[in-house]
């Protein structure tokens, strides 16, 4: 091999001497901080719409959840004598997602408790960013749901210029307990096109940041464009819910409705794609998304709770190590010896 070729492989310093470094040699301008803040930017439009539609209490919950999440992470890392990482944006994402997945009428102090569960109990107790097995925001939400089910199922809907707290006023809850007639009464029309329009743009009851389908999709497409998430994951999860619901209900309208209802869109684009708690390989991520979709349908159909996205993702998080083990790619060039397991 020529000296020039060797120099191209090993590299040279300013004096022309050969320099050799260990692998990996792949370099990227991306960083944890850049990725995290990009996810925050992708979530901001849907969160801002929730504040606009539901009122200032939603903004209070967003601020409280984010600030408390950052403070809890800072205090824990200081107490454990670890490097403080609050500037990377991961705690901000956790607080923002937690607030967006909760009712806008939630008392602010519950947001603080939810952030504690997400940051301290789920994330930091497992070792911090990159070590948590479960999605922190959904752990916080699940903890609040178990502790204060009434507050977590009291929703806000717009009645002209008046904001009323209405228990169970989400489209999913109304459909589950009252059928399509009750759903038509909720939207004031039996025109499915009008219902889809309300669901698509976000003019409906629900959690603070889950209502605007279009803004969540745009945020997800931005992350796909940047290469931070794989498009197969949200597509498989959402399509699984739609196909199975359409087969069970025998109604294409209900299939489309279920794909836009509840927290499916935000869960599929922003939580099932979590780099830490989802499988490593694309094949594993696709299996993960399929499982999330199936469990969501089972909970919506058979469970007492009308929504199933949160628990489906948490259950699949528990299976992530197993999925990674099952779909682990073969080592290139390795030969299986006789008698090896």
Image (cartoon, grey):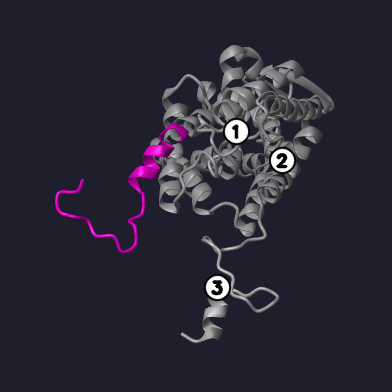
Q: Which residue is mark 2?
A: 89
Determine crowd level at label 3: few under 14, some 14-19, many 20+ residues with C-alpha closer than 10 A: some
In the image, 228: left or right of 253? right
The numbered mark, 1 or 3, whose residue comes first in the sequence reads 3
On the image, which quarter does residue 113 sit in?
A: top right
On the image, which quarter does residue 43 sit in?
A: top right
From which residue to which does the magenta span run? 317-341
Mark in front: 1 vs 3: 3
The front one of 172 and 286 is 286
The front one of 278 and 296 is 278
Query: Residue 10: which numbered mark, if any?
Result: 3
Label 1 to label 3: alpha-carbon separation: 36 Å
For the image, the number of numbered tags is 3
The front one of 35 and 213 is 35
Determine crowd level at label 1: few under 14, some 14-19, many 20+ residues with C-alpha closer than 10 A: some
Residue 201, image x, y percentages: 70, 43
Q: Is residue 125 above or below residue 287?
A: above
């Amino acid at each position: 091999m020529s000296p020039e070729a060797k120099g191209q492989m090993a590299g040279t310093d300013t004096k022309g001497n050969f320099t050799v470094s260990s692998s990996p040699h792949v370099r990227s301008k991306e960083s944890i901080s850049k990725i995290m803040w990009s996810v925050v930017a992708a979530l901001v439009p849907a969160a801002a719409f929730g504040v606009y539609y539901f009122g200032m209490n939603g903004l209070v919950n967003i601020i409280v959840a984010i600030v408390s999440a950052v403070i809890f992470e800072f205090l824990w890392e200081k107490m454990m004598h670890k490097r403080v990482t609050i500037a990377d944006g991961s705690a901000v994402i956790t607080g923002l997602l937690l607030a967006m997945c909760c009712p806008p009428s939630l008392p602010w102090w519950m947001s603080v408790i939810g952030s504690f569960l997400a940051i301290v109990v789920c994330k930091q107790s497992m070792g911090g960013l990159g070590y948590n097995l479960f999605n922190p925001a959904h752990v916080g939400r699940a903890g609040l749901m178990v502790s204060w089910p009434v507050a977590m199922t009291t929703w806000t809907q717009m009645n002209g210029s008046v904001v009323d707290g209405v228990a169970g006023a989400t489209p999913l809850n109304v459909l589950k307990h009252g059928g399509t007639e009750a759903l038509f009464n909720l939207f004031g029309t039996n025109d499915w096109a009008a219902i889809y329009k309300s669901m698509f743009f976000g003019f409906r009851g629900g959690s603070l940041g889950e209502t605007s389908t279009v803004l969540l999709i745009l945020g997800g497409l931005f992350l796909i464009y940047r290469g931070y998430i794989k498009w197969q994951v949200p597509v498989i999860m959402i399509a699984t819910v739609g196909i199975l619901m359409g087969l069970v209900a025998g109604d294409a309208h209900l299939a489309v409705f279920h794909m836009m209802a509840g927290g499916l869109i935000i869960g599929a684009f922003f939580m099932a794609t979590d780099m830490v708690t989802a499988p490593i390989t694309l094949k594993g991520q696709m299996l993960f998304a399929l499982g999330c979709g199936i469990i969501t349908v089972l909970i919506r159909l058979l469970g007492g709770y009308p929504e199933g996205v949160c628990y489906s993702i948490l259950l699949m998080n528990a299976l992530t190590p197993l999925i990674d083990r099952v779909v682990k790619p073969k080592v290139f060039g390795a030969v299986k010896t006789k008698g090896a397991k």
